Image (cartoon, rainbow, N blue to C red):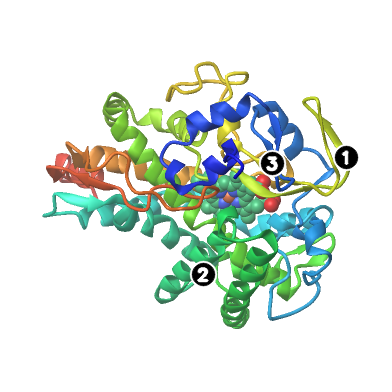
Amino acid sequence: MAEASIYDRILDPASRANPYPLYAELRKTPVRREADGTYVVSTYHEITALLHDPRVSSDPRSRPELGGAMPVPEEGPPGLPLAFINRDPPGHDQLRELAMRPFGPPCTPGRIEGMRPWLTEIATGLIDGFAGKHRVDIVDAFAYPLPVTAICRILGVPVEDQPRFHHWADAIIQTADPTTGTFAERMRRRERVNADLGQYLSGLADAHARRPGDDVISGLLTETGPHGPMSRKDLLSTGGLLLVAGHETTVNLITRGMLTLLRHPDVLDRLRREPGLITPLVEELLRYEPPVQMRTNRTTLADIDIAGTTIPKGSPLALMLAAGNRDPGRFPDPDRFDPERTDNAHLGFGSGIHYCFGAPLARTEAQVALPELARRLVNPRLVADPPPYRPSPELGGPRHLLVDFDTIAPAAERVARAASPGAST
Ligand code: HEM
């Protein structure tokens, strides 16, 4: 039997907690061909070049093995048309531009920043729920509910429907995991889940069309770009994409963030005293422990020469974002967690035309969540290091993060009020 390649070992769930030594091995050959024809790219400059290359497609229909078997975007249910993360220009650009209008800057500049007080309130309430306990699972009790509540509120999904998304988001994220079946099988599974999600979103869009609110779905129903409004089917795909993309990724940034802070108690301590540290700290987390470790959805549309290798047309790519983030050719001392790192153009949100659409929201959530945990958990300790991980090598992080603590400190706002009792509320 052939020996497992480094890439095979990275895909193995046993490597989930610490894939970084394997990434270092990979980088010795920046572009490496796997037995199945996948080209694994692991160095910063090569990954960036491919993310910006118009000869690289994000559309699953570019895969020769699918042979046009997937529905074209204009076809209707049971599946939804491809969302813009899986489309190439010009369709990608038109949909992204329309989706951006109600979501945030530059068309709706105040939406994300305006959520900061509300996000702080949610975080405070979740930590208040730890009262009387000495152990919590940061994932289930904090890192999951915060971003899910936020994305549902932004999109206008009623609170009581939130648990249904847990199931759909998990199922869709699993279809991005290259260890759970061939590409074609995973795309078929995704279509089935999308059918259920699409049906739900269709009912939601009808409700918002009858009574529009200050939410993104209502905005998508009314916004018009230079090419006209978004079609109803594209609107459902876009809503589904935002819900799923806004679910698991930020959960993992908060969880990986807390894990990293607990492994670096000096930084945790500084964060309590220096609130301004959080901005560069979140960027360093996105470099050092990125929730999206790799992207395996790209296909070459032409022969591409890179790093002395010709990647033939029609080849699947595995772009190893987390390996690029630790490339010593780009970042000095890359295995050091340094919250004061300057020149930190990490690949945590990707790069190029598909650069993360939700980056401002994800940053704001992490900037609110981590200082709250740092400030209020008194003497926090990791129960298990490493913690148990989710199986996906592509999108993921710890499944649980058990933390022991002595007690919780009062919320900052209450401390301020107690200090100046005359202040109005
Ligand atoms: C820490 C949290 C997050 C991380 C690490 C993250 C990471 C990424 C990455 C690496 C990409 C590039 C994908 C590619 O090139 O194929 C991406 C794209 C995207 N992200 Fe995020 N994301 C996060 C949060 C969010 C949130 C909260 C939302 C939604 C509100 C969101 C929506 C999107 C969308 C729609 C795209 C596709 C953009 C396009 O194709 O033009 N993300 N994200």
Name the amino acid type tagged 1: Asp
**Residue 409 shows in the view:** yes
Q: Position of residue 342 (x, y in %)?
A: 53, 20
Gap in angstroms between the C-alphas marked 1 and 3: 17 Å
Q: Position of residue 195 (x, y in %)?
A: 63, 77
Rendering quarter of residue 317: top right
Foreground label between 2 and 1: 1
State which quarter of the image contains the N terminus. top right
- Residue drawn 83% across and 49% down? 314
Q: Which of the numbered marks, if any, corresponds to residue 303?
A: 1
The residue singled out by tag 3 in the image is 34
Q: Residue at label 2?
A: 168
Kindly identify the residue that appears in the image at 40 percent across and 41 percent down.
256
In front of the other: label 1 or label 3? 3
Residue 197 in the image: above or below residue 425: below
Amino acid at circle 2? Trp
Q: Secondary structure at mark 2?
A: helix
Q: Residue at x 28, y 56 (%)?
A: 126
Point out the residue furthest to the right here: 302
